[in-house]
Image (cartoon, rainbow, N blue to C red):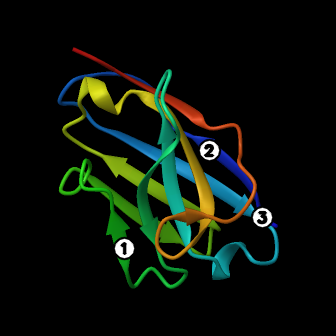
Amino acid sequence: QAQLVESGGGLVQAGGSLRLSCAASGRTASTSHMGWFRQAPGKEREFVAAITWSGGSTFYADSVKGRFTISRDNAKNTVYLQMKSLKPEDTAVYYCNSVRWPNVPAGSWGQGTLVTVSS
């Protein structure tokens, strides 16, 4: 299984932007469908976005559609999540993981990266 390290989180004002990165290691990293998930305080972890191993298809939760963009660079074994027009309700710890298409987590979780959106 790939090992995953998320980064790029931080504190941002509502309406702002952030880009998260997920560095993956392991033989299957570049051939796995990948996704982003998030867990807000006191809530269950939820799906955010996914991308196929080739980058040819993407899938988004309705709550982020039009605001977030998932992408990947297989040469760098890295998956990105560009987040725009952030809202306080986007505050959460964000995790990446391999997925069973399109939104079922399929691997081990990393430590996540905290995104805090202030109003």
Q: Residue at the spot x=46%, y=28% of the render?
A: 40
Q: As shown in the figure, which amino acid type bears the numbered disc 3? A: Ala
For the residues labelled 1 and 3, the Cα–Cα distance comes to 20 Å
For the residues labelled 2 and 3, the Cα–Cα distance comes to 13 Å
Q: Reply above or below: 40 against 100.
A: above
Mark 1 or 2, nearer chain start:
2
Q: Nearer the viewer, residue 62 or 88?
A: 62
Check disc 3 and report the residue beneath it. 2
Classify 10 Å Cα crowding around label 2: few (below 14), some (14-19), many (20 and above).
Answer: many
Q: Position of residue 38 (x, y in %)?
A: 49, 41
- Left or right of residue 58, residue 99 in this image: right
Q: As shown in the figure, which amino acid type bears the numbered disc 1? A: Thr
Q: Nearer the viewer, mark 1 or mark 2?
A: 1
Q: As shown in the figure, which amino acid type bears the numbered disc 2? A: Glu
Classify 10 Å Cα crowding around label 1: few (below 14), some (14-19), many (20 and above).
Answer: some
Quadrant for the C terminus, please. top left
Q: Position of residue 31 (x, y in %)?
A: 65, 82
Under tag 2, what secondary structure? strand
Check disc 1 and report the residue beneath it. 58
Mark 1 or 3, nearer chain start:
3
* Image mark for residue 29: none
Check disc 2 and report the residue beneath it. 6
Classify 10 Å Cα crowding around label 3: few (below 14), some (14-19), many (20 and above).
Answer: some
User: How many marks are shown on the rendered structure?
Assistant: 3
- Left or right of residue 11, residue 100 in this image: right
Q: In the rendered image, which quarter is residue 1 located in?
A: bottom right
